[in-house]
Amino acid sequence: MNTLFKDVFGVLKFAEGLYAGIRKVLVPPKAYSWQTFIYLSVFSWVLSYFATSYIKDVIAFFGWLFLIAGTAWYTTEDPLRVPGTFMPVGAVITGFLVSVFAFGNQEDVITPRTIVFWPTISALITAIPEFIEGNDTDAKARIPKPQDRQRIIILVASSMLLSCWIQFYFVMDNWLEQYPSLQADTFKRSTFIVRREQAVKIPQNGVVILEKLQPIVVEQIAEKPWSEVEKWLLEAKQRVGTLGREIIKINLDKYEEKDLWRIEPRVTNTKSGYILDLLSIWIGPSSNPRGYYLKKSCRIEPVAATNNSGNKITVAEIECDRASKLIPGSPPPQQ
């Protein structure tokens, strides 16, 4: 029986201690405290949920201000420093909230600009108290001591440099998303770009163009009368150019680099017929001063056939390479 009472008493004592701990965190010791600002921010966001029009944005605006003020107050009461600096961890958290508040939006709270400005804002928040002396009721501006100025400048400059590197990452990521062919050639030796697929060396958009173009050309030439094929080859520049522009428009419309590809044919006479080279020419920036192009060759030869009337005629037979070849340098001149 005594053991039972001891167990019950122990549970009650534990519950009392847990309640006291929660109460100490949740109940402000006085009206002017960081908990008050946090509660005001939560209250503001609840009200903004039921509000409409511009009132909703105004209430949400004050909710953000209360949250930032409460977080800054709480994290600076007993500041934990970022290792190697005098920047409080609370300044990093507050800087993130300020950056989200300033550069976020309803569709995407965390945007690239939010991440880019985060280190710089955190450094500025750390530096601001160095220019103020006094207490909450009697504060005035001051100029930091020379030794303090040096560490403030180093901290702010380092944070701005970090912001620049983060911005550089987003710029490069956007370039490689809109101009993926740059990664295969222009940035292949760059120390800033880490390619996920090291084996990919041929610009895939150039390959796509030729892969889509080949079956259309084959359809227009295969088993057609030889005289018509020779006429087609005489007009190959115009025909292939038109087909190429249509293919680029359909397949590369989502890429900004669509205007940096040009499609041209090259026709060469052989003893047995013709060779039609389909060229996908890159006219954008390249590590090679003369650029590069992709080529897919098709061999066209006359063969004997019989028409529906039973008469013998000469038609064209065409066979194209399976894969496209990447060739550095300028394409051969048109004849």
Image (spheres, rainbow, N blue to C red):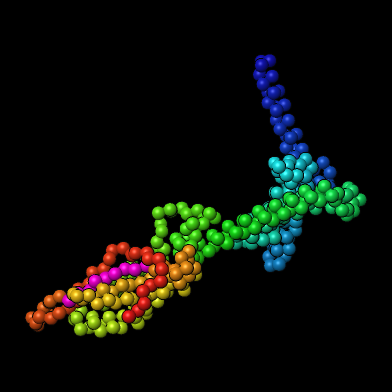
Q: How many marks?
A: 0
Q: Which residue: 23% across, 82% down?
A: 230
Please tell me whether residue 300 belongs to the stretch shown in magenta: yes
Q: Is residue 254 visible?
A: no
Q: Going by the image, does 226 lie left or right of 55?
A: left
Q: Quadrant of the C terminus?
A: bottom left
Q: Is residue 73 above or below residue 265?
A: above
Q: Along the horizontal axis of the image, is 289 left or right of 240?
A: right
- In the rendered image, residue 227, in percent from the top left (x then y), is placed at 20, 84
Q: Residue at x 19, y 81 (%)?
A: 226
The residue at 49%/60% (across/down) is 187
* Residue at the farthest top position: 2
Q: What main secondary structure does the magenta stretch of the protein show?
A: strand
Q: Is residue 26 above or below residue 319?
A: above
Magenta residues, start to end = 294-302
The image position of residue 148, as x and y in percent, is 82, 48
Residue 41 magenta-highlighted: no
In this view, which residue lies farthest toward the left? 310
Position of residue 327 measured from the top left corner of the image (x, y, whole percent):
37, 66
Q: Quadrant of residue 26?
A: top right
Visible residue check, residue 265: yes
Indicate the quadrant containing the N terminus: top left, top right, bottom left or bottom right.
top right
Where residue 7 sits, quadrant-wise, is top right
Front in this rendered view, residue 3 or 244: 244
Q: Give the camera-side residue of 236 and 24.
A: 236
Q: Position of residue 155 (x, y in %)?
A: 73, 50
In this picture, residue 228 sits left or right of residue 261: left
Q: Residue at x 67, y 55 (%)?
A: 161
